[in-house]
Image: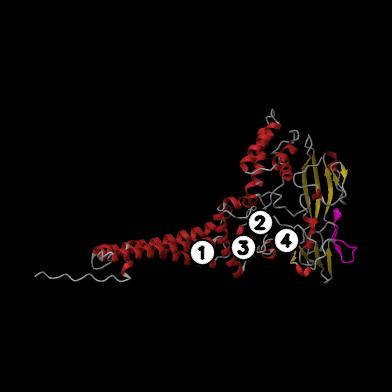
Amino acid sequence: MSEELPAPPTPTRLSRLRNWLSLAGMVLSAAAFFAFVLLFAVDLMATHANPYMGILAYVVAPMFLLMGMAMILLGYILESRRIRKGLPAKESAFELNINLSRKRDRRLMVAFVGGSLGFLFLTAFGSYETYHLMETNSFCGETCHTPMEPEYKAYQHSAHAQVDCVACHIGPGTTAYIRTKLNGVKQLYHQVRGDYDRPIQILNPNLRLAQETCQTCHWSQKHFGNLHKTYRHFLADETNTPFTVHMILKVGGSDPVHGPVEGIHSHMNVSNKIEFISLDEKRLMIPWVRVTDPNGKVTEYRTDEFKDDISKHSIRTMDCMDCHNRPAHNFASPNDAVDQAMAMGRIDPAIPWAKAKVVKALAAPYATREEAQQKIESSLRADYPDDKRVESLIAEAKAIYGQNFFPEMKADWRAHPNFIGHKDSNGCFRCHDGKHMASDGKTSIKGSDCNACHLIVAQGAGEELEKVNLKGFDFFHVDSEYSEPNCAECHNGQMQEE
């Protein structure tokens, strides 16, 4: 009589995880958890926050962790189905029997431990390198290529091109840390959906205060005094007549300890405190201003149209960014960009009507960059059919457009006005328009006196430009004296002097 074989052991729930799919999921989950802990520790100890760390640590790593857990669950379910069908456990289960007295098992154990350590090392190394990649400016500007391309290209040609993006765009403290992580995840979400703002709005309530960004490098107490600036323009006539303005800017300072409180920088909240109400997000419409001087005297100014109770509005304390609003992301207007190209010799001023023709081609509406490049070229070829210089003219016009115009994102100088000065946007004249009156009804914020902030020491061309007046000339507008202060009412970045 044959001896009966013992019945195979009943599979336990734990044994159902002993299959290749579940084991692979365990390895993946362990690596993902290890990567998350490592990235979290690195980010926590970093000297500054990384805006995209939220994507890597709180999206990518958890995604792989969930993927590994899904593999574990799927292997468990498949194994359970096989057992319910009556298949012997030994046909489906992976038997893990290790006997270190056997040479083969010792080799397998060494290979497994070595492979596991190597995998964890690669996970750590890859996570760390990815972290540093995400800190780079190119990652900030090029990963989300379409939405961030305008800002990144403008940044590359700015005075802050060597300053890391995170130095200005990340806030200090726990709140800013958490907000940064969530913002990175939100950016990924909108990038995938394609429903991001067009154009991207940089001005937002979460941006760090200037005291926490600008003033870590720029000393607000420093007295600058007067600075000399030269502006080279070309008129929109047949000969592209040059018109140069040598100007002394009264930058001054705001700290009486280091110099007199005077000039443009007297706005800084060191001696004076300036507050205002804006009726729009871009801070273009400012109907109410309050000034507190060093002696504590408070003066309020408002326009005639603004009758609201100020308690119904949010009052902002003025800082650097209210004037220097495009310190690293400025888009040149067609007028200014062509002036600069002609001053640098990239556009030959001897080409008749070059200023007017190129500005007109640049300022025309286009749906895409491809359409713009084609129409700019065809327009200029039609204007100069027999001029060999048209090739260089077309090349420079295309280069200007590629640097400053992004029709897919609706981004250019109109969408992002620069508040420094008052030629192409209201800038200074948001307040200094002569319409903001004090409560006595007689005193207004100084606006109509051009010499209050700058002196024109020379202007014009040729012999006229050689005449210097340190007391300041009245501004001579091409062919006549100019008395109205608000340049932006006529100039809009593309209108030319006739």
Q: Nearer the viewer, residue 233 or 76?
A: 76
Q: Whole-Å distance between the Cαs marked 4 and 2?
A: 18 Å
Q: Nearer the viewer, residue 412 or 242?
A: 412
Question: Would you say residue 439 sits in the magenta stretch?
Answer: yes
Q: Amino acid at mark 2?
A: Gln
Q: Whole-Å distance between the Cαs marked 4 and 3?
A: 17 Å
Question: Would you say residue 298 sits in the magenta stretch?
Answer: no
Which residue corresponds to the image point at 33% horizontal and 70% vertical from the top-left?
14
Q: Residues within 10 Å of mark 1 (few under 14, many from 20)?
A: some
Q: Which residue is mark 3?
A: 170
Q: Which residue is mark 2?
A: 201
Question: Which picture quadrant has residue 300?
Answer: bottom right
Question: Which picture quadrant has residue 67?
Answer: bottom left
What is the secondary structure assignment of the residue under circle 1? helix
Mark 3 or mark 1, which has the lower sequence index?
A: 1
Q: Nearer the viewer, mark 4 or mark 2?
A: 2
Q: Which residue is mark 1?
A: 58
Q: Amino acid at mark 1?
A: Tyr
Q: Which residue is mark 4?
A: 320
What is the secondary structure assignment of the residue under circle 2? loop
